[in-house]
Image (cartoon, rainbow, N blue to C red):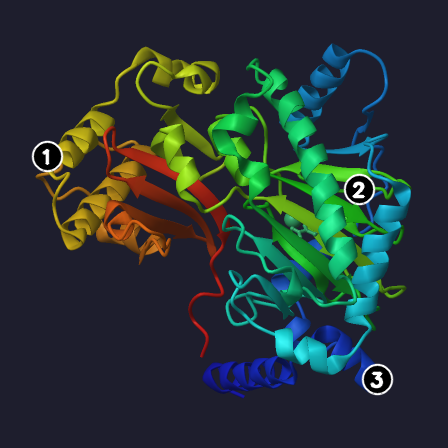
Amino acid sequence: MGSGESENERIRELKDFDSTKLGVKGLVDEGIQSVPNIFIRPPEELSQELNCKRHPSSGFQIPVIDLESGRREEIVSQILGTSSEWGFFQVVNHGIPAGLLDGVMEGTRLFHEGDGETKKELYSRDTRKQVNFCSNYDLYKSRAANWRDTLTVNNLFDGHLDPNDIPSICRDVALEYTRHMKKLGDMLLELLSLALGLNPNYLKLKTECTRGWSLVCHYYPACPGPELTLGASSHSDPSFFTLLLQDQIGGLQVLYQNQWVNVQPVPGALVVNIGDILQMISNGKLRSVDHRVLANCIGPRISVALFFTGLISSAKFQNNWVLVGIKFEEPKTVLEFCSGPGDGRLADHCSTEETRRTKTNPVAEQVFAMLQREKNCKLQRKKSIITVIFKALILMAHDKSFSHDSKPYDEEEEQELQFQMTENKEKGEDTNAMDRSIALTLEKNHRGISFALHLETPPTICLCQSFRTHTAKAEP
Ligand SMILES: O=C(O)CCC(=O)C(=O)O
Ligand SMILES: [Fe+2]
């Protein structure tokens, strides 16, 4: 079979799988005895894997932090140490009732093992829908599908989540779980702020990141050929940070010193991992580390992740964040970050030697000048200005000089980082709101970070949310 033909065959298989709307669990229920081709990892990846141990027996262990032990300073220092070294830690004595942890796992199991019709109705590839069920959000983009199904509940817009959209079988427990976890999230944000040498309320007030969240309930069915596929491919989380509850089966691995290290299940513990945004705004002091989940023949494995992403909401605009340079390569960092005139505290704490030296940023100044001049211009014009700004940001990330009159970027870079511009959907009394704020998504590697640009005085670029955008496009 020629490569064109085999590609067509693959797309047909993907579509067949997708159209069942029952995910991997549906395949298993049908009694399949081997792993279908669409799930099999590329040969070079598999052979690489065989060269290193799939189940590492190294002595490495992700730190487990007891939140009720000893002095706060000690806990803060442990969190700083592990967040900068591993990007991961586990917490015990976190205050979430054991019954609630069991309840949310059971709710997840009941949903995934429950009524097929409910699953079909919720099946969608639109990751921004408030509630959706899906197998492999990146099905048509990834090289191999993962052995996993997922129910997602999104609370990304202020007060927009209608509890009735959550499947009744897990509705109450999901809501109670997120209420409790938000409190824990806020407590961890205090510790993370202290770890960065900031006022304990700093990250909570500046990012409001625990107000917007995605609850992601994974189900990894038992797999007939676990060595051929993965439960979740290697990725870093596009969140501020993530709180994860896993069952006792195991399979989650973290990349540490170029080795995959198991995140050993600890009864009652929650896994905390730093996401891309916290890595960026801390200029890499806190690390967002790649992790993955192995497929397993003794499943199902269940895990529940809560991504704190921040709200998409005008409340963010009051923060006056100005983000003037980001870097997507490892280590992902913000080259320059400040939060409005006279308040560059986070930048002061986290900026690199280089950004500290060049306190004012020529690109930022040009951007501000442009925005000030164009404050009352039409939406179309604003969009083109924003495009220029983002090209500037990328250029900064690539360390090139930028002039708004010259041709500021090369086409290849533009292709690599695709722009998607969306008008801010926010509705309200104020009919001008849409004209005054524009959301924009910067996408790389099928993941996106979205920013909102507010054209009031002072003009601000706000980091709104980071999310996987790969589902928005490329569905054949
Ligand atoms: O299931 C797990 O243990 C991890 C899931 C995960 O990494 C994610 O949802 O981003
Ligand atoms: Fe993850």
Single out the mark in the foreground, 2 or 1. Answer: 1
Secondary element at image label 2: loop
CB of mark 2 within 8 Å of CB of mark 3?
no
Q: Residue at x 16, y 55 (%)?
A: 380
Q: Position of residue 229 (x, y in %)?
A: 72, 65
**Picture coordinates of residue 30 (x, y %)?**
80, 86
Q: Residue at x 33, y 11 (%)?
A: 357
Q: Is residue 385 left or right of residue 185?
A: left
Q: Secondary structure at mark 1?
A: helix
Q: Which residue is identified by label 2?
A: 263
Crowd band around label 3 with a 10 angstrom C-alpha radius: few (<14), some (14–19), many (20+): few
Q: Position of residue 451 (x, y in %)?
A: 38, 43
Instruction: Give the CA distance from mark 2 to mark 1.
Output: 53 Å
* Nearer to us: label 3 or label 1: 1
Residue with the mark numbered 1: 373
**Identity of the residue furthest to the front in this view:** 429
Mark 3 = which residue? 31
- Look at the image and tell me in which quarter the C terminus lies: bottom left
Q: Amino acid at mark 2?
A: Val
Q: Does the closest atom of ligand 1 sit within 8 Å of the Cβ of label 2?
A: yes
Of 160 and 215, the residue lying toward us:
160
Closer to the chain start, of discs 3 and 1, is 3
Q: What residue type is disc 3 on?
A: Gly
Taking 211 as reference, is 32 left or right? right
In this rendering, is residue 12 above or below 399? Answer: below
Q: Looking at numbered disc 1 in the image, what kind of residue is underneath it?
A: Arg
Q: Is residue 33 visible?
A: no
Choose top left, top right, bottom left or bottom right for residue 152.
bottom right
